[in-house]
Image (spheres, rainbow, N blue to C red):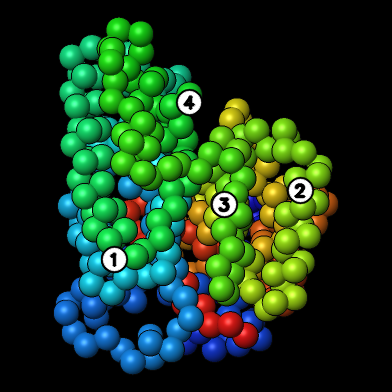
Amino acid sequence: MRSLLKKFRGWIFPAGFTPDYEHLDQNRHTIFIGALTKLRQAARGDQIDQSFQKLQERIVYIGCIHGGDEEIYNRLKALAKYPPDYLIFTGDITGSVEIERLKKQFYDERTKNPHGFLSQFPYFGNWAATLPRIKREKLLLGLQTNAEHLLSIMELLRKRMVKLYLIEGNWDNPEISGVRTIAGNDIKPVFNTHQFFERHGFHFINILEILETKTTLHLLLPYICLLRFDVISKNKIEEIQKKIRLARSQKKSIIMVGHAEANWHIHHLKQPDSTLSGDRKMVIRQFGRAMALFRPDEVIYPHQHERIRDEKGRLININAKYVLQVGDGNVHLVTNPRQTSGNNNQIVATYVPFGYMAEEDFVRN
């Protein structure tokens, strides 16, 4: 694995970036990903490109927010100036700036000192749970403030007729959320993000759900669904596969959105021997199994927070994607760009980093 990943060159780019990949069907995956996506013109108040008017559907995906900072809220507000047809939150809207700041410090320190004190804690929440109560209370204070801020923007977008979908991430699930771990048994009550948004008419998707539009069929896979993918019945899987076949016959794009890493190694090219264990290992394995069963044209996912870096630690272009090959009931990383064919056994993977947005512009083939 070490020698294989050091030679990884399997990046692909949307149309206009790398002519070497013209053999790929450019309609099979997102054509842009970035901080403001194609909304940069609208965000500046400039005249909207007339070509947008010809598009049948525009779908925007937003990565983990976790409470976020003002920048991500401004990006969301900009959507209201030229609203997409759909806005899909890909999971983990729960959180606060304080929690994210401390979480980053935790993982940075563990990376810097892999055998240091923090190495005994497999997960940020496990360590945060050991902090004094007053410190943990301060971490949790921002949950409601950030939820209220996000709600005001979501209500604005809903008034602009944007259809909003909230995929449940691991931090959004009341059963396994890191919020519950931080609170422990001595901090009660704790703000419940799930209940808050439900009261205002925004419902979290916590089961495998299909979203069919004029030009697409989306498979929405929340974290808890991937963790417990084995409980999905054979009949349910066959029913979804039938709907996919029908959608393909109608020339619709098949898009899977899941809250988990589509591939572990692509995010750890600097650490080719990095191993998986516990729930994370299970979720990634089940995500791969779901891709193999349903064979979407593209998989879109958040969950990791940092941008992807190459083996030398250099940031990969934000527009870069990679390809997964279906085989042996799971998916495998395609390492050679010349091996990309664009057939139904290959899946383009789009990663949406923390606080970023990705856009699909669909026109019926």
Marks 3 and 1, Cα distance to the nearest angstrom?
Answer: 23 Å
Q: Is residue 142 above or below residue 81?
A: above
Return the disc, 1 or 4, that comes first in the chain's sequence: 1
The quadrant holding residue 274 is top right
Residue under label 1:
160
Return the disc, 1 or 2, that comes first in the chain's sequence: 1
Query: What residue type is disc 1 on?
Result: Arg
Return the disc, 4 or 2, that comes first in the chain's sequence: 4
Residue under label 3:
220
Query: What residue type is disc 4 on?
Result: Ile
Q: Is residue 129 above or below residue 56?
A: above
Q: Which residue is nearer to you in this view: 40 or 19? A: 40
**Location of residue 144 in the rendering, given as x and y in whole percent from the top left corner:** 22, 33
| Mark 4: secondary structure | loop
Return the disc, 3 or 1, that comes first in the chain's sequence: 1
Query: What residue type is disc 2 on?
Result: Ile
- Classify 10 Å Cα crowding around label 2: few (below 14), some (14-19), many (20 and above): some
- Classify 10 Å Cα crowding around label 3: few (below 14), some (14-19), many (20 and above): many
Q: Are marks 4 and 2 in contact (CB under 8 Å)?
A: no
| Mark 1: secondary structure | loop
| Mark 2: secondary structure | helix
Residue under label 4:
176
Marks 2 and 3, Cα distance to the nearest angstrom?
Answer: 13 Å
Q: Are marks 2 and 3 in contact (CB under 8 Å)?
A: no
Q: Which residue is nearer to you in this view: 20 or 326? A: 326
**Location of residue 308 in the rendering, given as x and y in whole percent from the top left corner:** 45, 57
Which of labels 4 and 2 is toward the front? 2
